[in-house]
Amino acid sequence: MRVIAASLSLFLALFLAGCSATGSVKYDANLSKFKTVYFADDISLFDQKYLPTVAHRLEQDGFKVVSKSEAIQPSLMCKFVIDQSNVFGFRVHVSLWDGNDMLAVAEAKNNGWGTAIAGETAAQNLVASALDELDKQLQQAKMNPHN
């Protein structure tokens, strides 16, 4: 029985590990002037369960997460979306906006059987990967000599 459980765990780990993350920050973005972040109004009910995780990470990056009505300008808007293109593929997208200008974006994708077998775990792992990538992009923006 332990052999079967270990084999199944290894099988799931291999299929869930196949994610990729990418991100970027606008070349001349000066993120240091932004102290507060609020979430976009159009985040789906399904995706809202991940907002506490996203908020916590944004706070670790030095932002105060507030409601839209509490946002003091200048403030960033955070968009967060999980797309499931098919039973085998998830894409997590998180981005920070100043009005209509996207300043930072990170995405994580996973295509494979692991997504179909353990969708919730795959989504949680992709959220973490996208937030790790956003952290990396925000750190690079802080070191940008053009800011």
Image: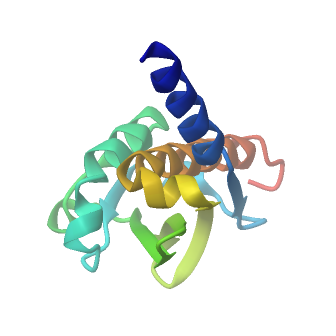
Q: Name the quadrant containing residue 102.
A: bottom right
| Residue 122 in view (yes/no) | yes
- Colour theme: rainbow
Q: Position of residue 116 (x, y in %)?
A: 47, 61
Image point 44% across, 33% down: which residue? Answer: 60
For this orientation, the residue located farthest to the bottom is 100
Q: Name the quadrant containing residue 70.
A: bottom left
Question: Residue 114 or 137: which is nearer the viewer?
Answer: 114
Question: Left of 33 or right of it: where is 15?
Answer: right
Is 106 drawn above or below residue 65 in the view shown? below
Image point 29% across, 73% down: which residue? Answer: 43
Q: Position of residue 11 (x, y in %)?
A: 59, 38
| Residue 108 in view (yes/no) | no
Question: Left of 23 or right of it: where is 58?
Answer: left
Q: Position of residue 139 (x, y in %)?
A: 67, 40
Question: Residue 129 or 66: which is nearer the viewer?
Answer: 129
Question: Residue 20 or 69: which is nearer the viewer?
Answer: 20
